Image (tube, rainbow, N blue to C red):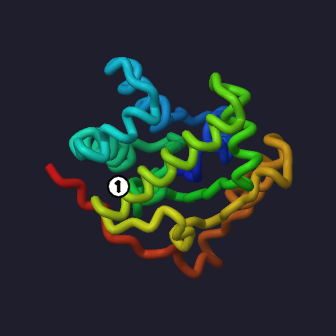
Amino acid sequence: MLLTVSGPPGGGKTTTAARLAEHYGLEHISGGDIFRSVATERGLSVVELNELAEEDDSIDFELDRRLQSIAAGRDDIVIESRLAGWLAGEHADFRFWLDAPTSVRVARIADREEGTIDEIAEQTKRRETSEATRYSTYYGIDIDDQSIYDLAINTARWDASTVIDIIAVSIDGYDDAVDEGTVEMEPVEIPG
């Protein structure tokens, strides 16, 4: 089974993907971890690497190619990233979108990163703007288009355990005999 978990920063992707992986005995692959490790290797913050990626598209292409290759070649995984649902495409058994109001997401990010709420809010806005511009320019993807997802959840409404329960009910209750189809997707073409 291949699951994708997507959504904006602070939406609950990492927590949910890790718990889904544990719940179903799957491996958790985090695009954010990959991106943060590249930032650290280069001595940059995530925001700085995002901004550098606006000038050097090879950064995004390499990360996206890596995630797309994992989705095409592996099973029994949960892939978590902003573009996981798009990059996994037809290989994904289920695609989930997690979100929360901006104020909630900023508070969550502030709990794990250094900085004031105002600084985190500004960084988050810059990061989201940067990513949305790049995804649209590179791949024609509107990151706010949730039509490819099987289920979208506002994670501010429930605790993390209940979010897992909601997703598990949707997976465990799936019946191929009544499935009228998922959104058909063309593979994302990554240059290079």
Camera-side residue of 61 and 4: 61
Furthest residue to the bottom? 180
Q: Position of residue 18 (x, y in %)?
A: 64, 34
Vertical side of 69 occupied by 139: above or below? below
Q: Position of residue 126 (x, y in %)?
A: 50, 47
x, y percentage for residue 28? 54, 34
Q: Is residue 33 visible?
A: yes
Question: Which amino acid type is shown beneath numbered disc 1?
Answer: Arg
- Position of 75 with respect to 102 (left or right) is left
Q: Residue at x 50, y 41 (%)?
A: 76
The answer to which image quadrant residue 133 occupies is: bottom left
Residue visible at 40% across and 33% down in the picture: 48
The crowding category of the residue bearing disc 1, from other C-alpha atoms within 10 Å (few below 14, some 14 to 19, many at least 20), is many
Front one among 9 and 77: 9
Q: Observer-nearest residue: 88 or 46?
A: 46
* Furthest residue toward front: 118
Pinpoint residue 181: horizontal percent, then vertical percent: 53, 78
Q: How many marks?
A: 1
| Residue at (30% x, 47% y) in the render | 54
Horizontal side of residue 7 vs 19, given as left or right: left
Q: Label 1 belongs to which residue?
A: 134
Reply above or below: 41 against 73: above
The residue furthest left is 192
Left or right, 105 with respect to 125, comes to right
49 w.r.t. 175: above or below: above
Q: Which residue is depicted at the point 61% across and 58% down? A: 97
Determine if residue 1 is in view: no
Q: What is the secondary structure assignment of the residue under circle 1?
A: helix
Relative to 137, is 157 on the left or the right?
Answer: right
